[in-house]
Image (tube, helix red, strand yellow):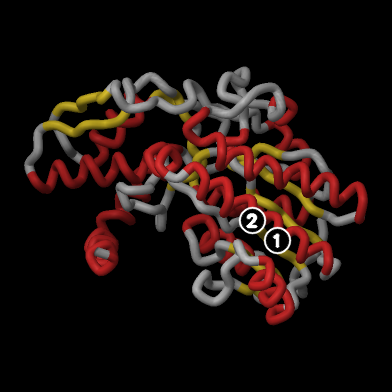
Amino acid sequence: MENFASARVLVTGGAGFLGRHVVAELNRRGIKDVVVPRSQDYDLTSENAVERLFRDTEPTVVMHLAAKVGGIGANRKHPGSFFRDNMAMGLHVLEAARRHDLRKVVVAGTICAYPKFAPIPFREDDLWNGYPEETNAPYGIAKKALLVMAQSYRQEFGSNFVVVFPVNLYGPWDNFDLEDSHVIPAMIRKFEEARLQGHADVTLWGDGSPTREFLYVSDAARGLVDALEKYDAPEPVNLGAGFEIAMRDLAATIQRFVGHDGTIVWDASRPNGQPRRMLDVSRAKERFGFVATTHFEEGLAETIRWWRAHRDEVLAREATRG
């Protein structure tokens, strides 16, 4: 295991949902010199801004977590923007890391990179055996291209770039904006609003049949820092909890936890997304000892508690954005 206590770690996206947990995990492990750039100061889609960031901060290690993300609706509405921004950010960050001869870069990929009909559980070797699910293919392909970039830079330049593919994340500080949130925060918010406003019905997208796997965000942060300290190979690594749950069961569980006793209405005119998602997580365990430890219902309850504690401030921020 490498010692990064004296490293200066640049965490792109460090102020975001996953990033703030990664920063906390780095600090817990004694890595205190952590740089978190803000988008208003450094636009990572700009090559010049990224080069200025590296000159200003002089990092020795990068954890590239920054991404333009969203649920099915956001991906359908902005496919070009999702591809362009994610591709540009990764391209500029990895190239700058090469030019500045950084000690190591850890890149967070996405489960959206997997083929639409990949065998369950998704194994890393299946990444190239088909086209991703159409609604989020531009995002998934942009992130998967960074795996190719990392591997080719390792081959040509000797760059120590590693790529980890986290499954769907959830937990405190998630994005609860219904315009671009993922499924768990969206469901929590919808059921909670229905409970507070006395609405009997809650309408959800699709028919409830797709399955998803979810990883608690602090577990994901631990896995990413494990990869930083213990993993130096070119092969991608899945990061997940190793289970799947159908959307209808997820909705029923969240409804029960929130305390809403109405009816769930499935709008089958809306897309389901990928039919099934569950990762083979054996490589992460074998290569650097990662195993998820947060039970799903425990993490779900903590996420609901966080939303209830922060709901008013989130709504106030949304109101100021108009």
* Residue at left offset 71%, top offset 37%: 285
Residue 30 visible within the image? no
Q: Is residue 273 left or right of residue 142?
A: left
Task: Kindly identify the amino acid type of the residue bearing the numbered disc 2.
Answer: Ala
Mark 2, residue position: 88
Task: Kindly identify the amino acid type of the residue bearing the numbered disc 1.
Answer: His
Which numbered disc covers residue 15?
none
* Residue at left offset 32%, top offset 27%: 270
Is 251 in front, or is 85?
Answer: 85
Where the C terminus falls, by quadrant?
Answer: bottom left
Q: CA distance from mark 1 to mark 2?
A: 6 Å
Q: Position of residue 101 (x, y in %)?
A: 85, 67
Where the N terminus falls, by quadrant?
Answer: bottom right
* Residue at left offset 63%, top offset 44%: 142
Mark 1, residue position: 92
Q: Position of residue 125 (x, y in %)?
A: 74, 27
